[in-house]
Amino acid sequence: MFNKRSGFDYGVHLRLKRTLHVALTTVIMVIIIAVLSVCFISWKNRLGSEQEELVQLWEAGSYDKAFDLSRERLLTKPMDHFLLMVHGFSAYQLAIAQINTFDTLIYLDACIWSLRKALLTREHPQDGRIQYVLGKAYYYKGQGYADLAVKFLEEATTLSYTVSDIPEYLGLAYAALHDYRKSVVSFTQALGPADDAGEVSGEHTQEGAFAGNAPEALDPSDLLLLSIAHSYMALDELDTAHAYLIQCVEQSRDSKIVVKARLLLGGILGKGGDNAGAEAQYMAILNESGENADAHYQLGELFAAGGNPTRARAEWRKAVRINPAHGPARVRLNM
């Protein structure tokens, strides 16, 4: 009797112990899940606020702060797509704002390093933004990188990223590669109707905020005309080049561009035997822009070709007086 009662009490105690254990375990699991949920929500909110902070810096034009902050956060998250994109885009904006070439190249290298790394993450569907900025960064790196500028700008176009200055930079890059036919095609496309530079379609997300903020577009009214003329001259299609140069002179308000266009016009006219027309272009430079070593040098060439060495040497001396380092004029004076 004693043994049966003891066994019964033991069974009740064991079941109670098991029930308490299960209840305690359940409570602990609930607490753990609650804590993890709070931590996850807190982490998510913090992540969102961090991205929002960078977006706000970008939209305020504080590219230096966005650059520094993204660089700092990349130390702990080196493959974060958003941070790499912000860092690269900010580096580009800082690069084009520099006066010193050395500083420009430092920021361009940072831009290229960050954006090419961002392409490796493949976290988001590619929409061409990164390729677009990479193409322009490589263009500004110099002629030796023109092939990479073409590569990434063409990729951006393939991805249907439509920004109005892509054809301009493609034209410049193709010209640097001496592919003047493709250069002309791109420049001609750039002269056609286009949306405002930098305005593209994109989702209204934090990363989408960076879609339209890209480097400055070139002036389509004069630089394009001058560049197209250069390409046609390289193709030896001088009549077409002449037409674009005339249009450039008539439209441009930039005196430096007008001087360049008139010098090219003078060269084309002189090559075609119209020495009077060439002289008129060089004299227009001197009358409109003041003394110019290249204009005096070219006048000297015209006078030499016309059998007047005295006037020719006088013009070459003027060129050297204006620019003592003018090599062609010095060579002519030493002959």
Image (cartoon, grey):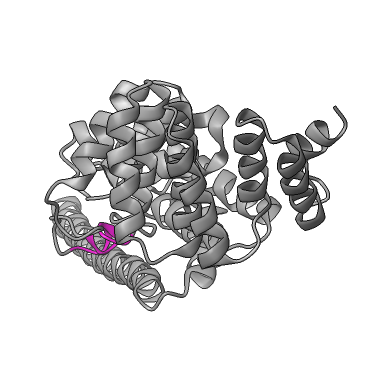
> Is 10 or 265 nearer to us in this picture?
265
Q: Can you give x and y, in whole percent of width and height, for residue 7 in the image?
A: 18, 51
Is residue 260 left or right of 20 when viewed as pictured?
right
Tell me if I can see residue 70 in this picture.
no
- Residue located 25% across and 60% down the image: 29
Tell me if I can see residue 30 in this picture.
yes
Number of marks in the rendered image = 0
The answer to which image quadrant residue 308 occupies is: top right
The answer to whether residue 284 is above or below residue 49 is above
Q: Can you give x and y, in whole percent of width and height, for residue 173 in the image?
A: 41, 33
Is residue 95 left or right of 237 when viewed as pictured?
right
Identify the image quadrant of the N terminus: bottom left
> Is 335 or 41 nearer to us in this picture?
335
Identify the image quadrant of the C terminus: top right
> Is 151 or 171 nearer to us in this picture?
171
The answer to whether residue 259 is above or below residue 61 is above
The answer to whether residue 125 is above or below residue 331 is below
Q: Can you give x and y, in whole percent of width and height, for residue 138 in the image?
A: 48, 38
Is 204 part of what is drawn in magenta? no
Seen from this angle, which residue lies furthest right?
334
Is residue 227 left or right of 247 when viewed as pictured?
right
> Is 44 or 263 nearer to us in this picture?
263
- Looking at the rendering, the stretch of residues picked out in magenta corresponds to 205-213
Q: Can you give x and y, in whole percent of width and height, for residue 103 in the image?
A: 67, 56
- Residue located 35% across and 28% down the image: 238
- Residue located 72% across and 44% down the image: 311
